[in-house]
Image (cartoon, rainbow, N blue to C red):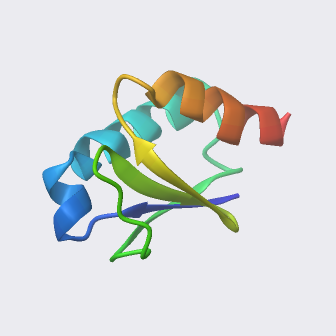
Amino acid sequence: MIIQICVGSSCHIKGSAEIVELLQNAITEHHLESDVTLAGSFCIGKCNRVGVTVQVDDEVHVGVTKEGFKEFFNTNVLAKLR
């Protein structure tokens, strides 16, 4: 699985560095290091007013926030790997 986090200007301001850190920690916590590749990406083209844009394989998710991170991770990463 490839997860790309937008680190462009808009998402950077909305906390992309924090989402990267949350992803790194969750991947380590669930021992998914060999199953998931994290990558930064400049604008994915789906900017939203709130949150960060994250692409999981071919699916683009907008509005990822630290408050909604756990649900995002469980639904879009864990559920698809198990």
Tally of numbered discs: 0
Residue at image position (50%, 30%) is 26
Pinpoint residue 21: horizontal percent, then vertical percent: 32, 40
Up-down: is 63 above or below 12? Answer: above
Pinpoint residue 82: horizontal percent, then vertical percent: 86, 33
Q: Nearer the viewer, residue 60 or 48?
A: 48
Residue 31 figure quarter: top right
Q: Which residue is most to the right?
A: 82
Q: Is residue 57 left or right of residue 25?
A: right
Q: Is residue 18 left or right of residue 65?
A: left
Pinpoint residue 51: horizontal percent, then vertical percent: 32, 44
Residue at image position (26%, 40%) is 18
Q: Nearer the viewer, residue 64 or 78?
A: 64
Q: Quadrant of the N terminus?
A: bottom right
Residue at image position (51%, 23%) is 70
Up-down: is 69 above or below 2? Answer: above
Q: Which residue is most to the front?
A: 49
Up-down: is 49 above or below 22? Answer: below
